[in-house]
Image: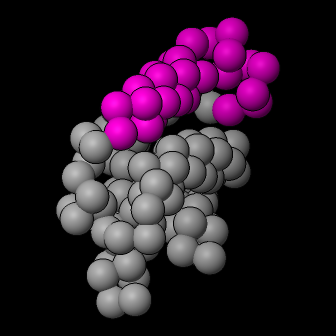
Amino acid sequence: MVIGLCTMASYYCSLKINTLAASTFAFATICLSRLLHGLSSRNEKPIYQIGLFSNKQSILAFLIGTFLLHLVLYIPLLQKVFLIEKVSLFQMIPIYIFSLLSFFLIQVKKCFL
């Protein structure tokens, strides 16, 4: 639910640009949120207790996934295939914020459960 809400918030905040940008923001937010969720889902304990770098394969998968996401966002041919709009580095800030917010909220939930 947290990832869904953060994705919808990202979409809503970017609607002032245009609907294609909003779809792009939602796509990027959900992709990055799910990559971060992969890091978070390794254990029932919060990430600070198990250690961020305790599983090198998870880190590698996250880095490769993030790299591939950025290829889709910045290579014109892939933008056409995925029907997304070009995103500037400045426009990536809300995507990063909403993705990290979902990661942070899930970690906070783990601390209290």
Q: Which residues are magenta?
A: 55-84
The reply, left or right, for residue 76 in relation to residue 57 is: right
Q: Is residue 79 magenta?
A: yes
Q: Is residue 31 visible?
A: yes
| Residue at horizontal 64 percent and vertical 45 percent from the top | 27
Horizontal and vertical percent position of residue 78? 68, 16
Q: Quadrant of residue 31?
A: top right
- Locate the N terminus and report the quarter of the image it occupies: bottom right
| Image vertical order of residue 57 relative to residue 33, above or below | above
The reply, left or right, for residue 67 in relation to residue 84 is: left
The reply, left or right, for residue 107 in relation to residue 11 is: left
Q: Quadrant of residue 58?
A: top left
Horizontal and vertical percent position of residue 76? 62, 12
Q: Is residue 70 magenta?
A: yes
Q: Nearer the viewer, residue 16 or 1?
A: 1
| Residue at horizontal 23 percent and vertical 52 percent from the top | 51
| Residue at horizontal 22 percent and vertical 65 percent from the top | 49
Horizontal and vertical percent position of residue 71? 53, 18
Horizontal and vertical percent position of residue 113? 40, 89
Q: Nearer the viewer, residue 112 or 81?
A: 112
| Image vertical order of residue 41 relative to residue 87, above or below | below
Q: Nearer the viewer, residue 22 or 59?
A: 59
